[in-house]
Image (spheres, rainbow, N blue to C red):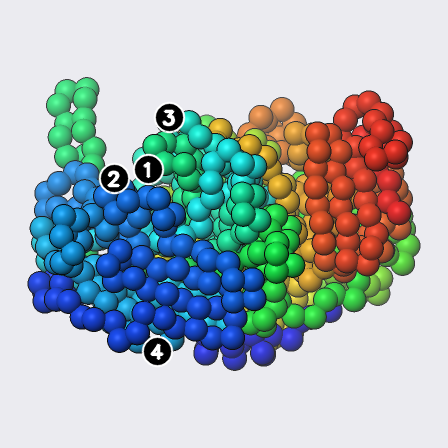
């Protein structure tokens, strides 16, 4: 079922896309151009209108605004609501935060009131000009001595708004963050409108009128993992997709924003309430890396500030594409339509391709070994201990295969290398841990999987490590912060997600070595004739690196990881990705551990399965591990509702040191405790998965405890999450059950 990615690889060389291939080679550091006041000279736009067959773009120099028209319906979409004045922050086409020399906090300026002379018709510090397919505007902030160039380009698929990084200017003050077109995707309050943000599985924020502004912001792809520990926080999910949207019920329109250039350093914002009658979702770009510093410490008190890098992102453009939706034009303006819009965008560019012929009925992640602390003559040392040997693994797999019959199964081996799940060495040393068995045992498992049509994958942790080994040295091959200190990570409990503060011992592999370790992983998996691999936390991480030139502000991370996946594919291997960011998901043959909920911030009004709506039917996906969930029944029912394969994390036995250890998930993953539950769930859902495994979702709705999913082939699934029976649309649904027809 290997996908052919040659088309995608070629497109990556031609298209500017944050997720696509750039290679892992060394890149030059980038600094911004010096500010010049002639940026503010007036340049008349040759023509105030640009159009193609689908859209018209109209520019107004006088108001520093633009409007996008959908020609099929005649509807207009404005860069800011017309009743928001130029003096209001929301009308600004760009909002720039900068830091002054020796300052401990940033200052913000606005590309409307701070670039326009509001009491006259004269434009003092702003200029625009006509370019091919659009307009270019320069926003010059004289007092701050900074300038930002923005290009507005009309295409066949909406409006691209982009910032050429080479067009940014500064002197002593340093640009830190740029918010772009904050009211392009705006909706009226209190009319049933909402904003969709891709936090985890996805979430809705209802537009409402209130005196207090409510604001959401979250880093795309989880933010910079290399930031010093005192600035990190652990949340239960992250933003995996570079897309957001709004549904305006007042005029039956919607807007989808897709972050194209610079997604690695992007943030997604949403705000509602306040003095205006509008809510909005938008994007910003953090063009510099940062770290917390202590600048004044007296006794037991200390004051901290933020230090920013001298160099900026190496991206050529920071850009967002806006695609309007209209119910009058036949579009679905709900989050279902937003998911279809984003999926069509990916399909149109070759990032998603052919559908899978079939999807596995079951996916299991089997835990091999971990490390424990032992003592010799009172001296503690770390030792591997098996929780599932290779022989035990084969027994588990064979029992599950007997249960499944001719149905497919995906098996991922995690923690079978040296150091096990502790990831003491990069890639587990690319050698088996002696506690799980030997090469002969592995060969027997591989042969069994091949004979029985089981997809077997080996997981290699290629980003996080604790000790030197496999040709990687902590001293010279770990990521370095701006302060020249090695970046360190918290370690987290698999089950609870809580940080283990006493174990601050993981390092990040310098980005210049990623290709080297990927080559070793490919060689290792091929040596053992295993047909698939996973690359551990690289599926969901982004990070800066000041040891390798050119990687400030997480530059090109998604593209570099995609290059690694392309290399695996070119070597004939399947890619299995868990908890995957978008640039991984579009290159994976299987995506496991799909996010099942959002980050659950208080501003969210409703969780939605947006991630699943985008990829279902095109990429085989699994739930999060059902047996590791707080509510396994709900997770199982969510899988049924969205057509995803059932996922379990399993081990065979518990070493005496792990039986009562609250910092492990082993107690929740014993196969013997779950095999009957697995059998029951597989038997109950197998027929449904056979019908919808490769079908996209047309409509998903949830009302109270009942969800309704309509698949492309017309099949409809009704799920009752309640602990009591309900009647929905005349259909009797037992407690915690589903019906499909």
Pointer 2 local density, CA inside 10 Å: few below 14, some 14–19, many at least 20: some
Disc 2 versus disc 4: nearer the observer = 4
Give residue 174's position: percent from left, percent from top: 17, 52
Query: Looking at the image, which residue is at 45% across and 56% down?
Result: 77
Tell me which label, 4 or 3, sits earlier in the chain. 4
Q: Secondary structure at mark 3?
A: loop
Which is nearer the N-term, disc 1 or disc 2? Answer: 1
- Of tags 2 and 3, the one toward the viewer is 3
The disc at residue 211 is: 3
SS category of the residue bearing label 2: strand
Question: Where is mark 2, residue-wise?
Answer: 292
State the separation of the CA atoms marked 2 and 3.
Answer: 33 Å
Contact, CB < 8 Å: mark 1 with mark 4?
Answer: no
* Between discs 1 and 4, the one toward the N terminus: 4
Q: Secondary structure at mark 1?
A: helix
Residue 588, quarter of picture: bottom right
The residue at the point 28 percent across, 68 percent down is: 136
> Residue 263 appears in which quarter of the rendering?
bottom left
Q: Secondary structure at mark 4?
A: loop
- Check the image and report above or below for 729 versus 267: above
Q: Judge by depth and name the residue closer to the eye, 741 or 32.
A: 741
What residue is disc 4 on? 132
Q: CA distance from mark 1 to mark 2?
A: 6 Å
Give the number of the disc on residue 265.
none
Crowdedness near tag 3: few (<14), some (14–19) or many (≥20) residues, C-alpha within 10 Å:
few
The alpha-carbon separation of the residues under discs 4 and 3 comes to 43 Å
Q: Are marks 1 and 2 in contact (CB under 8 Å)?
A: yes
């Amino acid at each position: 079922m290997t996908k052919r990615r040659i088309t995608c690889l070629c497109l990556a060389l031609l298209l500017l896309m944050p997720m696509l291939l750039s290679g892992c080679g060394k890149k030059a550091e980038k600094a911004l151009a010096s500010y010049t006041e002639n940026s503010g000279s007036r340049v008349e736009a040759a023509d105030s209108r640009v159009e193609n067959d689908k859209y018209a773009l109209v520019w107004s120099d006088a108001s520093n605004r633009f409007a996008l028209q959908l020609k099929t319906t005649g509807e207009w979409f404005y860069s800011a609501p017309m009743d928001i004045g130029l003096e209001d922050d929301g009308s600004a086409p760009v909002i720039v935060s900068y830091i002054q020399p020796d300052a401990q906090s940033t200052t913000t300026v606005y590309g409307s009131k701070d670039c326009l002379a509001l009491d006259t018709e004269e434009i003092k510090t702003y200029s625009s000009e006509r370019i091919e397919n659009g307009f270019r505007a320069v926003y010059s902030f004289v007092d701050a001595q900074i300038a930002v160039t923005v290009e507005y380009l009309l295409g066949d698929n909406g409006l691209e708004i982009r910032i050429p990084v080479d067009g940014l200017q500064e002197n002593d003050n340093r640009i830190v963050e740029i918010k772009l077109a904050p009211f392009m995707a705006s909706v009226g309050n209190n009319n049933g409108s909402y904003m969709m943000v891709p936090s985890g599985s996805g979430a809705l924020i209802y537009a409402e009128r209130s005196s207090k502004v409510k604001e959401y912001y979250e880093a795309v792809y989880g933010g910079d993992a290399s930031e010093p520990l005192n600035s990190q926080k652990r949340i239960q999910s992250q933003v995996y997709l570079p897309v957001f949207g709004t549904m305006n019920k007042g005029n039956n329109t919607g807007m989808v924003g897709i972050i194209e250039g610079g997604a690695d350093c992007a943030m997604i914002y949403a705000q509602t309430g306040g003095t205006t009658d509008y809510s909005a979702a938008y994007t910003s770009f953090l063009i510099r890396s940062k770290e917390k510093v202590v600048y004044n410490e007296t006794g037991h008190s200390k004051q901290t500030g933020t230090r920013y890098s001298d160099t900026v992102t190496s991206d050529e453009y920071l850009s967002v594409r806006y695609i309007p939706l209209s119910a009058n034009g036949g579009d679905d303006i709900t989050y279902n339509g937003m998911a279809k819009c984003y999926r069509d965008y990916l399909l149109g560019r070759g990032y998603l391709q052919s559908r899978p012929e079939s999807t596995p009925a079951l996916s299991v992640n089997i835990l091999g070994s971990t490390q424990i602390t032992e003592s010799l003559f009172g001296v503690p040392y770390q030792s591997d201990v098996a929780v599932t040997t290779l022989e035990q693994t084969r027994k588990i797999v064979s029992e599950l295969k007997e249960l499944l019959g001719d149905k497919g199964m995906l098996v991922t081996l995690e923690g079978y290398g040296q150091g096990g799940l502790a990831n003491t060495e990069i890639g587990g040393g690319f050698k088996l841990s002696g506690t799980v068995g030997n090469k002969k045992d592995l060969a027997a498992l591989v042969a069994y999987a091949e004979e029985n049509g089981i997809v077997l994958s080996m997981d290699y942790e290629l980003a996080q490590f604790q000790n030197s080994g496999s040709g990687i040295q902590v001293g010279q091959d770990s990521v370095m912060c701006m302060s020249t200190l090695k970046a360190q990570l918290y370690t987290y409990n698999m089950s609870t997600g809580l940080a283990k503060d006493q174990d601050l011992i993981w390092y990040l592999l310098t980005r210049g070595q990623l290709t080297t370790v990927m080559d070793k992983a490919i060689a290792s998996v091929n040596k053992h004739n295993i047909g698939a691999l996973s690359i551990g936390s690289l599926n969901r991480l982004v990070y800066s690196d000041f040891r390798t030139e050119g990687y400030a502000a997480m530059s090109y991370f998604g593209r570099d990881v995609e290059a690694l996946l392309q290399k695996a594919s070119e070597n004939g291997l399947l890619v299995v990705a868990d908890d995957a960011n978008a640039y991984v998901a579009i290159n994976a043959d299987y995506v496991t551990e799909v996010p099942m909920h959002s980050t659950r911030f208080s501003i969210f009004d409703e969780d939605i399965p947006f991630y699943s709506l985008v990829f279902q039917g095109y990429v085989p996906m699994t739930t999060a591990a059902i047996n590791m969930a707080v509510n396994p029944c709900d997770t199982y029912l969510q899988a049924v509702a969205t057509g995803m394969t059932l996922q379990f994390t399993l081990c065979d036995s518990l070493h005496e040191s792990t039986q009562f250890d609250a910092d492990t998930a082993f107690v929740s993953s014993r196969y013997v405790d779950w095999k009957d539950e697995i059998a029951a769930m597989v038997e109950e859902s197998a027929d449904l998965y056979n019908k919808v495994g490769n079908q996209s979702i047309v409509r998903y709705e949830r009302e109270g405890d009942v969800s309704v999913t309509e698949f492309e082939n017309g099949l409809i699934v009704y799920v009752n999450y309640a602990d009591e029976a309900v009647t929905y649309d005349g259909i009797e649904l037992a407690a915690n059950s589903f019906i499909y027809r």
